[in-house]
Amino acid sequence: MNGNERTRIGGVALAGLAAAVGLLALPGCLGPPALFDDSWNDRGKSPDFDWQKDAVKTWDLLPQEQAGAQKLLVARPWAPLTEQDAHRLGGKEVGTPALGTPYLLRGVYLLENGRFHVYVKDGQVVVINQSMGCGTVWRVKRRGLIVRLKAPPISFFTTCMIAV
């Protein structure tokens, strides 16, 4: 076998591996409804956005603030915050007013190792959590997070995905 044949075989193997990994990814918290049904999980198609241009920085809440913060998100998926509330919930400064008004947003996730990404375009806010893991059963969990927005959301979409 010469070098070109090894390259072709390696390329086919890599293409097969990439296809297999793609098949194992569970976008949009899709799966058995009993595991992924949660009123916070939007299982439809997200609005279009640019992964780089429309990204917004997020701040985590202190663990002891999660339960109270989630109560603020029962009626709608976002809530404006005062500067003082944002600092209290996050336990630190969460950006500057030049970045916009602090908002508390709904988020859903499957595994703790995931990362939240928030995108804003034309008033549409998209919150996605991406994580990696192995196993067969995951349940959607909720988490509040803080962002700064120039204006209140017009529409809101949140979901999560996992690569196994």
Image (cartoon, helix red, strand yellow):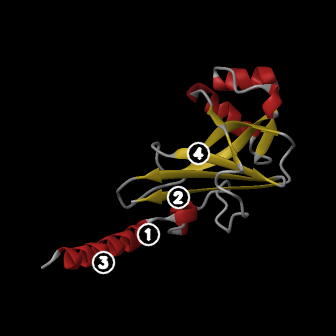
The image quadrant that residue 44 belongs to is bottom right
- Mark 1 or 3: the one toward you: 3
The mark found on residue 116 in the picture is 4
As drawn, 78 above or below 96: below
- The earlier-in-sequence mark between 2 and 1 is 1
Q: What is the secondary structure assignment of the residue under circle 2?
A: strand
Q: Which of the two discs, 4 and 2, labels the residue nearer the N terminus?
A: 4
Q: Using the numbered discs, state the Cα–Cα distance from disc 4 to disc 1 in whole angstroms.
A: 20 Å
The circle on residue 12 is 3
Q: CA distance from mark 2 to mark 1?
A: 12 Å
Who comes first in sequence, dot 1 or dot 3? 3
Do tag 2 and tag 1 residues touch (Cβ < 8 Å)?
no
**Residue under the image location 72 percent in, 42 percent down:** 105
Task: Label 3: state its secondary structure.
Answer: helix
Sequence-wise first label, 4 or 1: 1
Residue type indicated by callout 2:
Met
